Amino acid sequence: MRTQQRRIGKMAVLLVFLFCALFSHTAYAEDLEGSFPYQTSGVSGTQEDTELGYIYRDSFFAESSYRMNPELARMSLRLAVAGFGAGEKSDASNLLALFDLLNIRYDEKTVHYTFPGPDTIGYAYGVREIGENESLIVAVVRGGNYQTEWAGNFTLGTTEDHEGFRTCADLVVNDLTEYIRQMPEGRKVSVLLTGYSRGAAVSNLAAASLDKLASESQLGNVSPENIYAYCFACPRNTLRLQEASEALYANIVSFVHPADPVPKVAPGEWGYGRFGTTYLLPTSITDDDYATYYETFLPIYLRYSFAGDFQIHTDNIISMDRKIATLASTLISPAFYVLTAQKTLRSAFMGAESGLSVVSNFLGAPTEVGEGDLINPFVAHAPELYLAALDAIGDGSRLQTCRSDYGFLIYEGDSFVNIFDSEGKQVVFADGENCEFAQEQHVCGAVYDSGKLLFDFPSTERYYVVIPSTEKQKITLQCGLLDILASRDAKRIEYNKVTLQEGEYTVLVLDPENPVLYSGITNAAEGIVEALVKGEAIDAKQVKASKVVVAGENTSDDPGEAEITPTPAPEPTVTGAPAETTKAESQPRKWIVPVVCAAAGILVVGVLAFAVFRKRKKGGAENDTVR
């Protein structure tokens, strides 16, 4: 009898132990959801005090940082926008409110939101317990409302990394390194580092430094697989392109919109890039199924931005790229920029005129055309665009459809221009001042900017450009491929000062890989296009290109000699569930498991205890009878 009682008792103790072990293991494994205070940027709509929903999961950090997680990207972006400076003092109040909601512990030693100066940076970090013997350090770098820190954005310097960003990144790295090394020995430590715009550039460099330290076992219990870096609207910050593309840094992720001017500087034409992997947000010239994405994206964007419409179109993209290319060409090189322009720009940003105004004056606005009107060049830099895009992308698979290049045309001349698609249907009519789209649905963009017609289109498509001449004139055409990821022309073919006599025409077969320019009698132009569309032979004079420029190769006078290998489209490894496009709906809770286990454990223990009690009572009764 007593043996049986002991056996039952041991089973009860074992069950209690197992229950406690299970409960303690899942104590920190939480899903948290809610909303935090947020002020919209007002760039694309009205500035509003509102709330932004979030979903956080401890399970984000159960897998390797080398797998891009779209859900973690969305949470990181929310941390980044919460990290914008709040109020006139540009303090961390919004970020600390979110830290509190996420149970991230911080103190005065981990919050470094210095009042903005030309070379300062704001950042804050704290720790959250995500397991019995595991901690998560969350670090956020200020990326908005940083006032005269604009001056640091244009402090390029003469070293391999952008000096203004590198100096600030070193501050972040030194603080985090000391903080990490103070963590208890034997404890697993993960690090999440995030930022937007300027904050993204600093986070990108800081994460690369942490990766390097961790790979050399100089960062305590932190390994590169536990360093998660998510950067948004990230400027180009380093000349160390070969090192930046190494596998070690693949856990550093950047998201950029092709129309956003901020990620285009420092110029790719000067050889600048960023560490890790860059993903393009979808546009009609980089995504084969943009229409279905847009249906999901638009209502989210309008809700987040409080805007009446979506103001970004493909012509915005080529306008920005051409302006940045012009700037890079004018300033020749980083060294020339530092020598002639850096001090002047820094002074402008430290004066009464804000950084936004200084840059806007340079970028300007192209002439209004059709549906495209770039009133504010920073519309594509609005955080609401990035928030809506990542929510609409869902599980991240759409990122695999983004190409890294697009075709372009630049035309200088007085004649009107007709552009036809690959089927011979007219798409664009341009009269020297305005552009009209002949088709309601199109994936190309056309705009007049600084007296030039700019036309951009998907790199997989072919177009035909017809330019007639009513008088003798000289025209100039440039066309080719622009590599968005590299932010520079991958291939450029130039037809400089081509002479047209009265009554002549040119037809440019606008194939990004192999364009061909024909000339002939004006009344034969339509027939030439029709024949080209059908693949028939034509009787027309072919005009030789003046110059062919291929990135990384020598200039050639013969188009046939130049070949191009564009930057390959990103092939992300993604994980995670589709995004919620509204305030988070009810999710399965991880607390259900421990609660159910607790109830089951209590029930089992109760049953066993009751069985023991009955046995004892029965045994006592038998003993009384014997007595």
Image (spheres, rainbow, N blue to C red):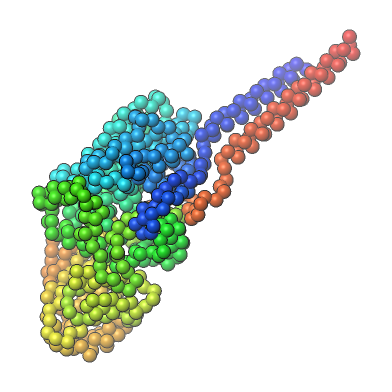
Please tell me which residue is depicted at 61% across the width and 25% down the height of the picture: 17
Q: Is residue 393 left or right of residue 523?
A: right
Q: Is residue 189 left or right of residue 165?
A: right
**Vertical relation: 312 (above or below) 240:** below
Who is closer to the viewer here, 102 or 425? 102
**Vertical relation: 300 (above or below) 36:** below
Give coordinates of residue 485: x percent, y percent: 28, 56
Q: Quadrant of residue 79?
A: top left
Who is closer to the viewer here, 427 or 378? 378
Q: Is residue 585 left or right of residue 235?
A: right
**Vertical relation: 529 (above or below) 110:** below
The extreme bottom residue here reads 523
Please tell me which residue is depicted at 24% across the width and 80% down the height of the picture: 431
Give coordinates of residue 337: x percent, y percent: 13, 51
Who is closer to the viewer here, 326 or 420? 326
Please tell me which residue is depicted at 86% across the width and 15% down the height of the picture: 622
Q: Is residue 241 visible?
A: no
Q: Quadrant of the C terminus?
A: top right
Please tell me which residue is depicted at 23% across the width and 76% down the height of the picture: 433
Q: Quadrant of the N terminus?
A: top right
Give coordinates of residue 521: x percent, y percent: 18, 88
Q: Is residue 496 visible?
A: yes
**Vertical relation: 507 (above or below) 268:** below
Give coordinates of residue 324: x percent, y percent: 21, 59
How many marks are shown on the rendered structure?
Answer: 0
